[in-house]
Amino acid sequence: MTTSSTLFSFSLLLLIFLISGGIITKVNGQEQKRWCIAKPSTNEAALLENINYACSKVDCSVIHKGCTCFYPDNLINHASVAMNLYYRAMGANYWNCDFKASGLTVITNPSYDNCVYA
């Protein structure tokens, strides 16, 4: 194999990896579901910015007082719910969970009580 064909093969594999969103995990032949949450280390200003951005694009009424995802009443929880709503609405691509590197995709369903992450 020549250097140029090796480089082409590597570039093609890298392109496929990037388009797929990284490593695709399959369970029983099905793509494993992912959710978007806020990174625990994210500062409060960034969390608030994420909530404002996501909720300007999607309906975040579930995090309003008296609704299913209001409690616990804190920024990390509200940001995670809002970010996941945005992530789902925009196609659930890895880039839809970036939020200036403050988002994290997880394979464990973060739903709790009556707050269901779609």
Image: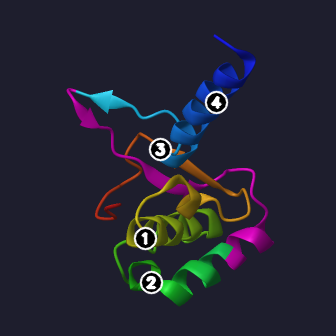
Residue tagged by mark 1? 85
Give the vertical position of 74 relative to 93 (above or below): below
Say what amino acid the circle numbered 1 marks: Leu
- Label 4 amino acid? Phe
Badge 2 marks a residue whose secondary structure is loop
- Between 100 and 78, which is closer to the camera in this rendering? 100
Which residues make up the magenta segment? 28-49
Apparent side of residue 4 relative to residue 84 in the rendered image (left or right): right
Give the residue pinned by disc 4.
8
Residue at the spot of label 3: 20
* Residue 29 falls inside the magenta stretch: yes
Cα separation between marks 4 and 1: 38 Å
Quarter containing the C terminus: bottom left
Residue 6 picture quarter? top right
Question: CA separation, marks 2 and 1?
Answer: 7 Å
Disc nearer the start of the sequence (3/2): 3
* Among the two numbered marks 4 and 1 on one chain, the one whose residue lies closer to the N terminus: 4
